[in-house]
Amino acid sequence: MSANRRKFLSTTISGGLASLPLSAAPGPSVAARYRKLDDILKQPVLKKQLFSTPVIIESLELLRLGDSYLCKVRSRDGAEGISVAHSGMSTLFPIFLKNLRPFFLGKDARELDLILEKVYIYGFNFRYNGLALGLPLATIEFAILDMLGRMAGKPVGQLIGEIHNPEVGVYMATEWREKPVDESIKLIKEAVAAYDVHALKIKVGGLMFMTTDMYAVGPPGRTEKIIPLVRKTFGDKMSLYADSNSFYSVPEAVRVGRLLEEYKFVYFEEPVMFDNIEEIKQVADTLTIPIANGEQDYSFYGFRWLLANDGLDIVQPDNYYFGGLIRSMKVARMAAAFGKTIVPHMSGGGLGYLYNIQFVSCVPNAGAHHEFKSTKTNVRFECRTSPLKVVDGKIKVPTGPGFGVDLDPEWVKKHQIVTMS
């Protein structure tokens, strides 16, 4: 970590000093850092020793009710697990059915680390990648982990790590960057008031993919107005984060980053194009505010390069997009090896927030607050070990087996098996 970013992380005092170049930073050489990261990637995540005999996957079903998709897995010995799919499954279900399901059938679920590795390296990497592969793969992984957790009588967090965070701090993720500042502030205040949160993320820069106007860049001057105003509105006790969703060039990201530093924002997410790793490092080396990236990454290589070259402070794999919790845990371990933080991105409705907090519960280098939009969901379930409500800025992680929730069996029965006709 460069000297100025280390100072910012420890004091959160804004500043404008340029960072030391990597060659001047203390610690191992870049080559040695790569070796350390590669060693971490080789280490298994799932605690296979919890299961004394093979857990052969006998069936893997995709179920649908309207826009709701579930994944149900059953072992040869009758153990079952279930997960709620990302909304994107409505587009990607053929990859689930034609490519991934046959690959999993007959496999030993205890070898989940190896199965995931083979899927990416030897299975479909040369034909499918990114979200198209990661999202259905994660849905399958979640169901298998739920099954294994129920078999072992342990929450998923204890299958892939140790419990470090029985409660997870959350931040309210807000949108509305296409609206004027006054209207945006009103909507943000309403969102914050609806939940007992102590942290907030705002959007800066231009419009996202939802717009159909190729030339739209949002209301002029909005970013420059909203950054100081949101600090004034919520005061110094509110932890503030900013996300540009890859909107800026390097000079513009630096300009906006200076403003974020001035108003003591905690980190700057996706300041430039998410896969331009050299530009991400340029921004990180110039600013004192920590830089976060990774929600759209689908391979280990971007994280590996940025961590080896000290170009990133906070890793943000999305547990759905990145292909599941086991792969995300490997990123968390790589980050921890160099004193970096993980704040996973959370996408999808359904039970996305539940899968996210179960993951965060077992990573020692988790950030203070994690993405949260709402607990509102069409999924019908019961949780006996947590109210799953935000209390004083935190959500209690369920401690029951698997993901700690039981889906309403009558609701599940209403779903129909999805087939390729």
Image (cartoon, helix red, strand yellow):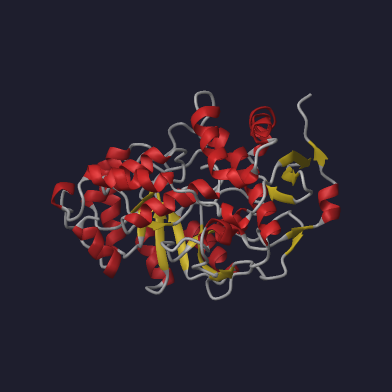
Q: Residue at x 46, y 66 (%)?
A: 199
In this orientation, which residue lies closer to the viewer: 26 or 211? 26
Q: In which quarter of the image is the N terminus?
A: bottom left
Looking at the figure, which quarter contains the C terminus?
top right
Q: Is residue 353 above or below residue 35?
A: below
Q: Is residue 375 left or right of residue 27?
A: right
The residue at the point 48 percent across, 53 percent down is 344
Q: Which residue lies furthest to the left in this view?
A: 24
The tally of labels here is: 0
x then y, percent, for residue 201: 45, 59
- x 54%, y 52%: residue: 346
Q: Where is residue 196 in the image (x, y as percent from the top left)?
A: 56, 72
Residue 125, visible in the rendered structure:
yes
* Left or right, 172 with reference to 99: left
- The quarter holding residue 314 reads bottom left
Q: Position of residue 245 (x, y in %)?
A: 42, 45
Q: Can residue 86 be seen in this view?
A: no
The image position of residue 139, as x and y in percent, is: 64, 44
Up the image or down, 285 lies above or below 365; here it is above
- Of all residues shown, which one is farthest toward the front? 52
Q: Which of 156 and 2 is in front in this view?
A: 156
